[in-house]
Image (cartoon, coloured by chain):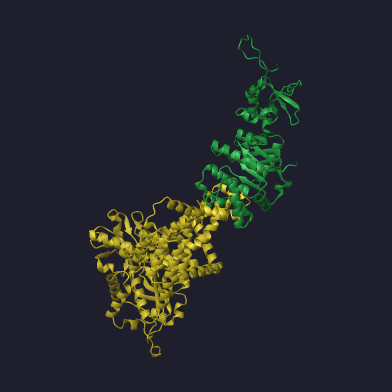
């Protein structure tokens, strides 16, 4: 069979779109971000307690007293887990994605219900959108819309589109043909047949579709977190990236509360707004069993309640926002300028990123740090979404990325070197000392090399070069995973003294925590050691000459780096910046050394 | 009097290349031949006319094309060939918009399974046609109430369709059709889904309403008894073609072919026949010269039997001007009831107590 260059076609298609349609993507991005910012501003303005109250009143109205109380408790839980802002940002993201998905899917569903041709064309397209692995869609979304909310919203809405279209089509097609014929026989125009007969009768099915859209959107939020949407998805992502099970669970619980609330509310809303649903509810009420806890306030009363709470919330928001004037200091070079640092959850990356976050904040910059996988991070740098990152392993490990994006990036030089990549076994594996030794011990290791993220450069190197050099391709499989997963696996095996071989690199704190043995590489298959480079978007150093200079001069010794990494490891997830502060206190004068402020600037 | 509704050589063919199929049908091709090619000829060369105020019943078994025929009359289906004239206006020449206007104002329809809108109350259902016409809300609700009252549903206006029995639901369907003041009522097996007692009630009510409203009605049914009860004129359809058109008596007394006669076997003749179709017109002239009870041509068969039982001789039939037009011997009544057309065969050994032959006494 000849190789079909489908991938090349897609590549050139994406390039063409980028070159010629960027105005369209920019327009979409503006709309999406505007909607998101608006909704997010509304949701985060009031006190959490008040907003939880509003949510509770809505639940009381739609479902009854028990639902109201539970909703209130659920949102209190979110607030008490300190996830309120993240939850509201996720809610805003889901709402924006849902609204846009409905604006697209309901008309499309109606169209598909009325035309067999449209239905036949739309169906496979929906299958494609829904089953295509989401990460595959996520990267083009970043290319088109940049990192952050809009890429997340677009990826979410593409994923969530299908049930909206399908259920709308199904709902309309399910309406009794005799009823449609009756409408036509009385001279109803097609438009009025749709509005007066088909849509009202299809409404329960359409509402079920909307419910599905929201639920799928929520489930996509976690994946969208990978492209820097923040919110609960970002929290889950960071937590799993750093093997922080507790925090991951908390963020997960937050998502569950949102999911249950949205699910119950939309399904109840289906009953409330569809004429058939109201009819069924009235019948059930007439049948008796009216209990006090089933009492539901009348719509007018519920609306008044929501409005009163919202007014109180808005009022408090106004008073709350009047605080916070910043003191300016002599070392305020940044004057509140925003800088975005991206990082891959690798230990030296976390350490150097939070070190610079702390230093730049001391110098008056507003710094945002966001965690990404390597691929999205380079894409974000190339499109200018991220200002710089400190963890590029050049020239070898990240050669692929450099080849692809190098022209859109500035290399600010190496701050640590040289590094080495290696396969590592615990020291108790007495007979395995070199890569060549692996061949005879394949069965002992189960033919398995525990690897890290498949997007990491060293994984590519291992698979295409190292295994071949030592003739290991047949006997070993490289298991793709993540750095934290690899470290967890290493820890587990080490505790039980089981055989394990992992991909590792120096410097790494694991070498100080465990007794490990780097496998010798006499054929030099891993290549020369890399330097850890700081890479910025094109023009960043020119825009920020001070920061550019500091970063170019940035150097760390092995003892500094491993010491900082160990301090961060000790403090735990979420406390990275505190760890950096503690460490900086132990190294007085380092900030001024790394980010010197010129005398004339100080006197200003 | 000119016809209100006329169908001229209507054809409806489903499938590919319908025009070609119509051509072949005109050349005498069979329905089965077309079916082999994957096209279905639902209605073939149907022509009829309906006078104002008449109930025209189209009778046929399922698959005979009667529902398709009905839907061509108000343009829900576009005929493949032929014309539909309503008050002299060619409906097949109208555009979609004008056709909708005609359906909204002049033609209404009653459905087999009622087709009430479940998301509207009884009153709103009855007002639907007026809503489409654009009648203001207050007026259309008032007129819907009147139509419901006419159909015996006063007091049920604020109920919902799912709270009513089948018969009552169909009354709502009838009220919805009557509320628009359309001249032409199309009824598609409207009483077929009801159980027999309710069906009779509805038939009676329709006839009663028709006395005062004088609508022009095209009624579809597969039930010949219903057709005979309701129809001023009846068309019998078979395999897409109209095989016979005529009054109930025409069909009963002079069936066009074996198919129709096999159909009418189950019909309760005594309900349909009148003196005019039973009487013998071969007269001597002196049959009415006694003072005995007589009948008119319209006297129903049942009553004729009762009169005959009270007389010792044949019943004389007199028209409006008291002119003798026919005579009904008892033998004839029995023959019609038993659908026997031959003269009785004389008995080989007549016994005492054997019935006397009274026919030509």
Q: Is residue B52 left or right of residue A465?
A: right
Where, by quadrant of the figure, is residue A601 drawn? bottom left
Which residue is pictured at 76% across the width and 22% down the height? B285
Please provide percent x and percent y for residue B3.
73, 42
Please provide percent x and percent y for residue B79.
68, 44
The number of numbered badges drawn on the structure is: 0
Say whether residue A523 is visible. no
Q: Quadrant of the C terminus of chain A?
A: bottom left
Say whether residue A446 is visible. yes
Please provide percent x and percent y for residue B359.
69, 18
Q: Is residue A337 above or below residue B268?
A: below
Instruction: Name the one closer to the observer, A193 or A35.
Output: A193
Q: Is residue B239 left or right of residue A480?
A: right
Please provide percent x and percent y for residue B195.
53, 37
Instruction: Name the one closer to the observer, A279 or A344.
Output: A279
Which residue is pictured at 58% across the width and 48% down the height? B148
Instruction: Name the one closer to the observer, B227 or A351.
Output: B227
Q: Is residue A166 above or below residue B319?
A: below
Among all residues in the image, which is located at the extreme top?
B349
Which shade of the palette goes to chain A?
yellow
- Which chain does green denote in the image? B
Q: Is residue A30 above or below residue B232?
A: below
Where, by quadrant of the figure, is residue A440 drawn? bottom left
């Amino acid at each position: 069979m000849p190789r079909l260059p489908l991938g090349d076609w897609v590549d050139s298609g994406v390039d063409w779109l980028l070159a010629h349609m960027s105005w369209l993507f920019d327009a979409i991005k503006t709309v999406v971000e505007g909607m998101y910012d608006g909704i997010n501003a509304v949701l985060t303005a009031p006190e959490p307690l008040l907003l939880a109250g509003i949510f509770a009143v809505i639940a009381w109205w739609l479902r009854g007293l028990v639902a109201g109380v539970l909703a209130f408790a659920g949102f209190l839980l979110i607030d008490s887990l300190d996830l309120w802002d993240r939850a509201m940002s996720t809610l805003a993201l889901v709402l924006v994605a849902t609204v846009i998905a409905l604006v697209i899917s309901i008309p499309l569903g109606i169209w598909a219900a009325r035309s067999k041709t449209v239905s036949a064309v739309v169906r496979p397209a929906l299958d494609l959108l829904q089953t295509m692995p989401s990460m595959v869609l996520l990267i083009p979304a970043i290319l088109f819309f940049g990192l952050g909310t809009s890429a997340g919203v677009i990826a979410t809405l593409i994923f969530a589109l299908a049930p909206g279209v399908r259920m709308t089509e199904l709902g309309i097609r399910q309406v009794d043909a005799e009823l449609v014929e009756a409408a036509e026989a009385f001279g109803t125009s097609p438009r009025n047949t749709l509005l007066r007969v088909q849509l009202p009768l299809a409404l329960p099915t359409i509402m079920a579709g909307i419910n599905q859209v929201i639920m799928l959107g929520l489930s996509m939020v976690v994946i969208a977190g990978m492209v820097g949407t923040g919110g609960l998805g970002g929290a889950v992502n960071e937590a799993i990236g750093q093997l922080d099970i507790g925090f991951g669970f908390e963020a997960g619980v937050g998502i569950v509360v949102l999911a249950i609330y949205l699910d119950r509310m939309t399904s109840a809303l289906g009953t409330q707004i569809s004429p058939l649903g109201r009819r069924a509810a009235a019948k059930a009420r007439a049948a008796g069993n009216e209990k006090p806890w089933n009492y539901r306030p009348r719509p007018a009363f519920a609306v008044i309640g929501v409005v009163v709470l919202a007014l109180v919330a808005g009022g408090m928001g106004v008073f709350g926002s009047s605080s916070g004037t910043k003191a300016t200091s002599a070392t305020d070079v940044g004057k509140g300028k925003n800088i975005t640092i991206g990082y891959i959850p690798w230990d030296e990356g976390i350490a150097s990123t939070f070190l610079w976050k702390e230093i730049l904040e001391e110098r008056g910059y507003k710094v945002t740090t966001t965690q990404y996988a390597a691929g999205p991070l380079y894409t974000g740098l190339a499109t200018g979404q991220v200002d710089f990152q400190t963890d590029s392993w050049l020239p070898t490990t990240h050669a692929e990325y450099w080849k692809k994006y190098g022209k859109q990036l500035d290399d600010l030089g190496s701050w640590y070197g040289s590094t080495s990549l290696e396969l590592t076994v615990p020291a108790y594996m007495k007979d395995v000392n070199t890569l060549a030794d692996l061949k005879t011990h394949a069965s002992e290791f189960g033919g398995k090399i525990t690897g890290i993220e498949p997007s990491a450069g060293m994984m590519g190197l291992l698979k295409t070069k190292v295994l071949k050099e030592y003739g290991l391709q047949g006997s070993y499989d490289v298991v793709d995973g993540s750095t934290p997963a690899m470290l967890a696996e290493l820890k587990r095996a080490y505790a039980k003294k089981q055989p394990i071989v992992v991909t590792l690199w120096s410097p790494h704190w694991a070498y100080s925590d465990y007794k490990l043995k780097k496998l010798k590489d006499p054929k030099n298959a891993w290549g020369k050691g890399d330097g850890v480079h700081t890479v910025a978007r094109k023009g960043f150093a020119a825009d920020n000459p001070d920061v550019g200079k500091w970063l170019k001069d940035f150097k760390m010794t092995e003892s500094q780096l491993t010491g900082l990494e160990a301090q961060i490891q000790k403090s735990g997830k979420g406390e990275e910046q505190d760890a950096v502060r503690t460490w900086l206190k132990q190294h007085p004068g380092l900030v001024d050394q790394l980010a010197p402020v010129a005398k004339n600037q100080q006197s200003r | 009097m000119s016809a209100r509704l006329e169908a001229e050589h209507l054809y409806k063919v489903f499938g590919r290349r319908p025009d070609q199929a119509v051509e072949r049908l005109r050349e005498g091709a069979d329905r089965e031949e077309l079916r082999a090619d994957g096209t279905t000829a639902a209605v073939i060369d149907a022509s009829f006319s309906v006078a104002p105020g008449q109930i025209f019943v189209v009778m046929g078994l399922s698959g005979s094309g009667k529902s398709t025929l009905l839907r061509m009359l108000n343009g829900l289906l576009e005929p493949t060939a032929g014309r539909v004239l309503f008050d002299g206006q060619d409906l097949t020449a109208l555009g979609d918009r004008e056709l909708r206007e005609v359906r909204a104002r002049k033609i209404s329809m009653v459905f087999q399974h009622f087709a009430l809108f479940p998301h509207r109350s009884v009153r709103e259902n009855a007002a639907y046609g007026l809503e489409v016409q654009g009648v203001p809300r207050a007026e259309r609700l008032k007129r819907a109430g009147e139509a419901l009252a006419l159909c015996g549903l006063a007091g049920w206006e604020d109920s919902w369709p799912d709270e009513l029995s089948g018969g009552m639901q169909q009354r709502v369907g009838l009220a919805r059709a009557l509320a628009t003041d359309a001249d032409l009522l199309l009824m598609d097996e409207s009483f077929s889904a009801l159980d027999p007692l309710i069906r009779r009630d509805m038939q009676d009510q329709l006839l009663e309403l028709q006395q005062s409203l004088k609508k022009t009605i095209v009624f579809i049914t597969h039930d010949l008894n219903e057709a005979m009860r309701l129809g001023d004129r009846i068309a019998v359809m078979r395999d897409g073609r109209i095989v016979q058109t005529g009054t109930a008596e025409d069909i009963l007394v002079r069936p066009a072919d074996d198919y129709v006669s096999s159909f009418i076997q189950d019909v309760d003749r005594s309900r349909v026949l009148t003196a005019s179709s039973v009487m013998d017109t071969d007269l001597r002239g002196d049959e009415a010269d006694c003072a005995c009870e007589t009948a008119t041509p319209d006297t129903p068969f049942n009553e004729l039997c009762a009169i005959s039982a009270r007389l010792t001789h044949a019943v004389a039939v007199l028209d409006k001007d008291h002119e003798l037009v026919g005579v009904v011997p008892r033998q004839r009544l029995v023959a019609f009831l038993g659908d026997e057309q031959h003269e009785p065969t004389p008995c080989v050994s007549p016994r005492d107590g054997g019935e006397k032959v009274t026919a030509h006494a």
